[in-house]
Amino acid sequence: MQRREAVKIFTAVFGASLAVPETVFARLAEPMDLGIKPTLLSGKQRKTLAAVAQCIIPKTDTPGAIEAGVPRWFETLLQDCYKPDAQKVIMDGFTNLDLECKTKHGSTFAKLKMPQQIEILTAMEKAERDAKVRGGFIRATKDLVKSCYANSEVGASTTFEYQIAPGRWSGEELYKMGDKIYL
Amino acid sequence: MQINHNGVVAENTYDAIVVGSGISGGWAAKELTQKGLKVLVLERGRDLRHVVDYQTTMSMPWDLPHQGRSPEESLKLQSVQARTGYTVQNEGTSYLFVKDTDHPYIEKRRFDWMRGYHKGGRSITWGKQTYRWSQMDFEANAKDGIATPWPINYDEIAPWYSYVERFAGISGSVENLAHLPDSDFQPAMDLTAAEKILKSSVEKKWNGRKVIPGRVAHLTAPTQEQLALGRGKCQYRNLCSRGCPYGAYFSSNGATLIAAERTGNMTFRPHSIVGSLIYDEATGKAKGVNVVDELSKQPMEFFAKIIFVNASCVASTSILMNTKTQRYGAAGLDESGSLGRYLMDHHLGVGASGTFEGELDKTTFGRRPNGFYIPRYRNLYQEGNGYIRGFGYQGGGTRQGWSRDIMGFGEDFKKQYTSLGPWNVNMGGFGEWLPYKDNMMTLSPDKKDQWGLPQVVVDAGYTSNELNMRKDMETDAAEMLEAMGAKNVSSRSSEPALGLGIHEMGTARMGTDRKNSVLNKWNQVWAAPNVFVTDGAFMTSANCVNPSLTYMAMTARAADYAVAELKKGNL
């Protein structure tokens, strides 16, 4: 943000009678310490993660997972917010995906073409659903990619729109497919 | 009146002391200072300045290091509260809840104790749902012959409801329901398209059932008085629990304590943990409070003519239990045997959800910090199956977004992911928990906290009344969703534990006689008439509605009475 936006919203609500200096509001809109450099994944796992994230949310007329910085968010959240057993499902998943691709297709997952990657992931998703696996690799990975993208600055200000202060409530707003979604 | 035998006593003497600055303490501070008393407000935690200290209030999701999820490292310090899935799991709000590692207590049976030790207490993070009680609710104990009768009736408290509502600002719709009286409302927050379908379906099918907008302490049309306090209209952010920079919802920090501060009569002291009252055996009153400084751990004493104990239900009860007096023998401050007993909460974690595939050309705009409400109807319009009293529901119906389960990958997936799904309609019950003598808290005889104060021991549970009620709560929710044509309806019910509702109450109840209660009808401690307890501890029964509005009204009423009695020379 949008520090200026934050201050503008306040003056709109309170007019000139702002009880607290503008600098306070500007400070409250500063990002917290984002200097986290995740160290959980190996170089190979990172390549696989990037390729999988791109298959889930590709670049179209709006940015994709890579443009939105999803891999870094993904690794940070996986490292800091997941319990070891849940981390293992995802990390083993990346490793096994690569091993399987090498055996079946003679190449790591990341080096395959996207249509083939999507075909592989689609089959894996179906198998996971058929086996009624809870918290399986595909589901867990997709859930985290979806959330990292929607909560990223790029995702939430291009594909979606997040307003810090919507300013009004409407219980009935017209909607059609393709309209931008407010988070 | 204190004898000025040394400087410290004079310096530490006020007209009144308020212990705690949460929702009821804030009201006590406002009322007493506005009536001209010099008031010391003691807060056990840190200062939390309105707006300035709401460190995450303007953070975008990507401004937070983990996009809003609390990391495991911090959850370890809040592992007791983390069991419940809300409060501390949010990176933007976890700083407003205590570290469990610093504030241990003992659970003989599970007791989820969610605490915020800072100025304003849980008035910063509360759910803001505000409902009046009715005459029926105040009569319930007497009629059912359980616990002890309430010593007050609706007509006595109704003007105080109006009084606090006009100051706090309550959004809601006028419904003219005898069992859920209307407040003095600001405009309601509209129901969504799906909620309106639910409303018409339910109201058509069942006599006496209503689906109405939630009643909530948010400004939708602020008054001059509210604007003058620096409070503005709700901006529909639904980031309330981080602290509201607009002062749009009611909190001590954004409303009552500002009003108290402006009188020039308030002294606010953070880091001041009250351990007990200083009892004067000669007069039969409390002359002050014993305090431990949170940081230096040094003991201190403060003195006053009137003491309001608003530390929150369990903590206020601990202060009374920890107070030494021989005046009434071994009973201490309580001759009735009810102190620490009759612990209540609301039981929840039961309800249903489903999807609704009509009205797909509509959605919502803004993030409403509220939803719909279904007032109690069981044992009013339809009999309950094997229990007394009843329950209400809180819920919401909004379009499913990106987080819904979507199969597939690539562009097709992205198209679904960036568009809305069907409506998701969800409701959860809030059930009345009866007052049971054996649901109790005590003080540990040997385990102490780092300030040398005895740890609280909680031992409380449910009976068949709660369990039978939960069956109806689960079945009815599913039936109402089915009535609107919802699909994929799934109901849920978990094992109830006290504390989850964060409405703990009842352990220093009021009653008609010093033999059946700790407090009289003015919230005065029978055994120390200059001490008033006006937080959840005073509740004689729980009803099924959110309690804060009743705490506010009873606090304002008690403060008015206390000052009148003081002027008459009775305290």
Image: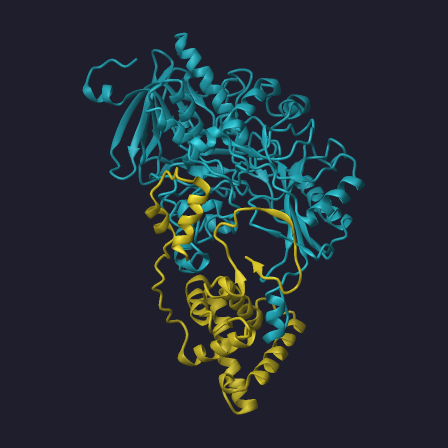
In this rendering, would B303 be left or right of B142?
A: left
x, y percentage for residue B343?
53, 33
Whether residue B409 is visible, yes or no, is: no
Q: Quadrant of the C terminus of chain A?
A: bottom right
Residue B269 location (% of width, % of height): 31, 32
Q: Colour of chain B?
A: cyan
For the residue pair B128 and A138, the one nearer the viewer reads as B128
Q: Is residue A76 left or right of residue B382?
A: left
Q: Residue B75: x and y, percent? A: 42, 54
Who's the residue at 48% across and 29% down the image? B224
Q: Colour of chain A?
A: yellow
Give the camera-side residue of B431 and B467: B431
* Residue B348, placed above or below residue B151: below
Q: Is residue B237 above or below residue B415?
A: above
- Outermost residue, left side: B6
Quadrant in which the N terminus of chain A appears? bottom left
Q: Is residue B477 visible?
A: yes
Q: Residue furthest front?
A: A16
The quarter of the displayed image where residue B456 is located = top left
The relative height of residue A47 versus residue B91 in the rendered view (above or below) is below
Location of residue B467 in the rendering, given as x and y in whole percent from the top left corner: 66, 41
The extreme right residue here reads: B205
